[in-house]
Image (cartoon, helix red, strand yellow):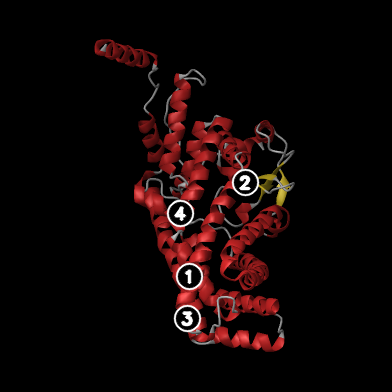
Amino acid sequence: MRLLVWAAFAAAFTAGAAHAAPLPFDPEEATQAWLATMGPEATARSNSYFEGGYWLDLADSALNIVVAMLLMVFGFAKGVRAGLERTVKFYFLVAFGMALFYILVSGVVTFPFYYYVGFVREHQFGLATQTFAEWFGEYMIGFALNLVIGALFIAVLYLIIRAAKSAWWIWGAGVTLMFMLVLIMLAPVYLAPLFNTYTPMQEGPLKTEILHMAQANGVPASDVSVFDVSRQTNRVTANVSGFAGTTRIALSDTLIQRASTDGVREVMGHEIGHYVLRHTSSILVMLGVLIAFAFAFTHLLFGWIARGERWGVRAISDPAGMPLFFAILTFLFTVAAPVQNNIIRYHEHQADIFGLNASRAPDGFAETALLLSEYRKMSPGPLELWAFYDHPSGYQRIRMAMDWKAHEMAAGRIPVGPGGPPEGWRPDFVVMREGATPEPSPAAALD
């Protein structure tokens, strides 16, 4: 009997090996060939930019915590709350006024940091296209939106804290998710046009392909919009945004200018994947759980830190404790950043696979991954990837595309050909830094 079992195993193994068609090229070699198109200088520059972001994120959190605690320790928060209680009296208005004060003061104090991160550093790495006046104008629009919308949300949250008492963190997480959902619905129609102009994409083969791909996968869209992100940056981007009747397919003018037709198709396939796979809903649910845990820990830590009415704070529902409340939240979300990154990276990986199968453009996938490498480190270590990446790394994306391409060739579903990049191809930003003029993309020629 044992002999028969071993014979059956050997037969199955031999049959499997016989039916496994050899791959037409080595996916790892093809991946390395794509990565090599960057060259050492561009690779070092990309690594420097991305790794510097790790420290800037930590500095951002630390700065906001320091500002919040200074408002507490020196009695500014208690004084403002007392003044509001004497004047506006109503609890909601006291919380709203305190939120306006906190956001305004924090924004003014931290402005030099955000000026460096958002303007100076972006120009140092050649990623920004705005003058200071243009950048500052948009910064102030964003700040004004944050001031009004943020203060309104915080006031509502404080009403929940006061009414629900020790169970506020459950209700607070639910209301936070509802607030985020409303913003997702309103953003494409009311917020995004404040920063960019959206115009219908010119008629042509590329637009037709995008609409066919979208409609074939159930996206309720009859048009494609182009927005002028080139007024701010040379980065490439696209999205299928909105919810419940506000869905819109949009791609940046930089994507059309810089990417090939296959590159554009693949990016749009990826964005369509987010919509079809209902990633907005699943991300909100997962983040909702994370927010609930953060609120619960905030409740515990707040009571411990502010015990005995320290700094004049009567309870967690006291608006005078608002800076402490958000200092604790900032600390917790900084610690939990890898969890949030992994949630988003999981969804991005799903959208990558969907985009490959929808667009059937593996070389376009590799090309756009290289365009993103201008500001994303391509080959991080495992711990680095887990802690800091909210998208798959460039190496992972290109390797997945090359695996897909090799197996589709082996199955006879696409023509057999080489695995690596076209001969002489290099990312346009590498070519431009060398003083040459990159070839116009086929996408730009079509539209």
Amino acid at circle 4: Val
Three-letter amino acid code of the residue under disc 3:
Arg
Q: Which mark is residue 307?
A: 3
Q: Amino acid at mark 1?
A: Leu
Q: Is residue 370 visible?
A: yes
Give the percent coordinates (x, y) of residue 78.
57, 86
Question: Circle 1 sits on which residue?
Answer: 300
Camera-near label (4 vs 3) is: 3
Residue that carries the numbered disc 2 in the rendered image:
239
Asked whether the beta carbons under mark 1 and mark 3 sit within 8 Å of each other, the answer is no
Between label 4 and label 1, give the one nearer the viewer. Answer: 1
Residue 41 position within the rendered picture, expressed as x and y whole percent measured from the top left: 37, 49
The answer to which of marks 1 and 2 sits earlier in the sequence is: 2
The residue pinned by badge 4 equals: 339
Where does residue 274 sit, x and y in percent of width and height? 59, 42
Q: Earlier in the sequence, mark 4 or mark 3?
A: 3
Q: CA distance from mark 4 to mark 2?
A: 24 Å
CA distance for labels 1 and 2: 39 Å
Where disc 2 sits, the SS reads: strand
SS assignment at label 3: loop
Q: Residues within 10 Å of mark 1 (few under 14, many from 20)?
A: few
For the point 51% across and 57% down, the residue is 290
The mark lying in front, picked from 3 and 2, is: 3
Q: Residue at x 57, y 81 (%)?
A: 320
190 lies above or below 370: below
User: What whole-number distance in Å separates the C-alpha atoms at marks 3 and 2?
Assistant: 47 Å
Which quarter of the picture shows residue 108? bottom right
Q: Is residue 250 above or below residue 34?
A: below
